[in-house]
Image (cartoon, rainbow, N blue to C red):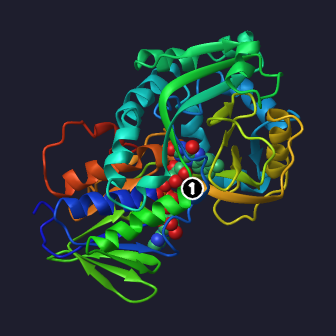
Amino acid sequence: MADGGTGPIAVIGAGIVGVACALHLQRAGRDVVLIDKGEPGEGASFGNAGVLARCSVVPVATPGIMTKAPGMLFGADGPLFLKWSYVPRLLPWLIPYLRAAKRETVEHTARHLAPLVVDSLDEHQDLARGTGAEKWIRPSPYLFLYRDRAAFDGDAFGWGLRRAHGFTWEILEGAAVRDFDPALSPDYGCAVMLQDHAYIGDPGRYVKDLAAAVVAGGGSVRRAAVRDVTPGADGVTLDTDTGPVTAAAAVLAAGAWSGPLARRFGANVPLESERGYHLELTGPSARPRVPVMDAARKFVATPVDAGLRLAGIVEFGGLDAPPSAAPVALLQRGARALLPGLTYEQEKSWLGHRPAPADSLPVIGRSPLCDKVFFAYGHHHVGLTAGPKTGRLVAQLVAGLRLNLDLGAYRPDRFGQGA
Ligand SMILES: Cc1cc2nc3c(=O)[nH]c(=O)nc-3n(C[C@H](O)[C@H](O)[C@H](O)COP(=O)(O)OP(=O)(O)OC[C@H]3O[C@@H](n4cnc5c(N)ncnc54)[C@H](O)[C@@H]3O)c2cc1C
């Protein structure tokens, strides 16, 4: 075995990325123990917009971000929030993040996001086949909504990148937008429809059903917070708050919480929590037919099984600060703007932590310091979409197989080892 041992593989973190790693490892014949400080599927994977966004090859930071950022931060309906006291801690991440908004870097990012997301529907269907998770996958178009054609033209850079990666779309204008979906506000004069996408009817339960499949396949799920990992001659020992766990190898898939352990094992990609919010409405009087992205307000509205979920917002403030009220109020205004006359029975809001690497590419690979430690974290805005593909790659890496994808761009030490 490439990992040097025959015991179980410990997967740290039971979000979509961790469960996908665990299932793929199990299907490759390995015993797995999936460890999470909480229940499976209750981190970022719980509350995302649920979109299998195979067209998401465009990172958030693109050329021109410095000119757009003040409007996003201070504008009445700006989707960017900052806890000002957090700025000094944010800077070591923010500087390389802004530097990565250059055209060539963004093109590099898109080139390496593409192989992780483009076949996401197939990857999810393959992962979930024969498990209780299969029922949550809903193939669907994905719609981007603009005020008018000029606003769409203003996003030409991103659409150009998508075209370069083979995506095509149909543009609906004026009455055609309402012909497709009469529930949408007439304020949207232009819609871009991409076919062959999908969404998950309940992202949290989807991950729990995948974790249940790990158990059904003979693996185990253990509730414990991993504090450290110590390499030994035959494998690794995980120090957890409920006692040690020995394993042949460990996969670090702890999402936005991966930083400290990853650094200890030679990963030095600056990682932040990009805080995002959702507002879930039960008993809504109207819902969009398919997931829609309000391109100006940067939220997605998804017709989830529980009702209507509006998800988005970028807030910087770290992992520990309590939720803020303003992002939720923005989503409430967004819901009313999207669906005029909307009424509903109840609303619930949620804050989650996107694992955001400074260059918007996940960390997938083997530790440069220990051949029994693997990384699978940092999936930013596309973790739900790219989780299954990541799991497949990690299982192949652990098995020592030759991969048909160059993982160089996802290297853990790409920002300089041990700095
Ligand atoms: C508002 C919002 C909308 C989004 N919409 C989409 C979307 O539509 N499509 C899409 O593809 N992506 C979307 N995303 C991004 C996506 O949700 C994330 O990229 C993805 O969930 C990350 O998955 P993960 O498994 O890496 O992390 P998580 O789901 O956060 O899982 C990490 C797990 O590790 C556990 N953990 C952490 N530290 C430890 C430890 N020391 N010991 C044990 N366990 C530990 C945590 O408890 C957690 O369960 C969205 C995110 C947000 C916030």
Residue located at (86% from left, 39% from top)? 336
Q: Using the rendered image of the protein, determine whether residue 29 is visible from the camera's viewpoint.
A: yes
Residue that mark 1 sits on: 202
Q: Secondary structure at mark 1?
A: loop
In the picture, measured across the screen, residue 279 lies left or right of residue 289, that is right
Residue located at (44% from left, 65% from top)? 209
Residue at the outermost bottom position: 243
How many numbered marks have been drawn onto this rendered protein structure?
1
Residue at the outermost left position: 1
- Image quadrant where one finds the N terminus: bottom left
Asked whether 159 or 210 is in front, the reply is: 210
In the picture, measured across the screen, residue 225 lies left or right of residue 213, that is right
Using the image, determine if residue 221 lies above or below residue 306.
Answer: below
Image x and y of residue 315, in percent? 71, 48
Image x and y of residue 288, in percent? 70, 36
Asked whether 77 or 334 is in front, the reply is: 334
Q: How many neighbours does mark 1 have within 10 angstroms: few (below 14), some (14-19), or many (20 or more)?
A: many
Image x and y of residue 179, in percent? 71, 19
Image x and y of residue 358, in percent? 52, 42
Asked whether 360 or 31 is in front, the reply is: 31
In the picture, measured across the screen, residue 93 lies left or right of residue 109, that is right
Ligand 1 closer than 8 Å to label 1 CB: no
Using the image, determine if residue 13 lies above or below residue 74.
Answer: below
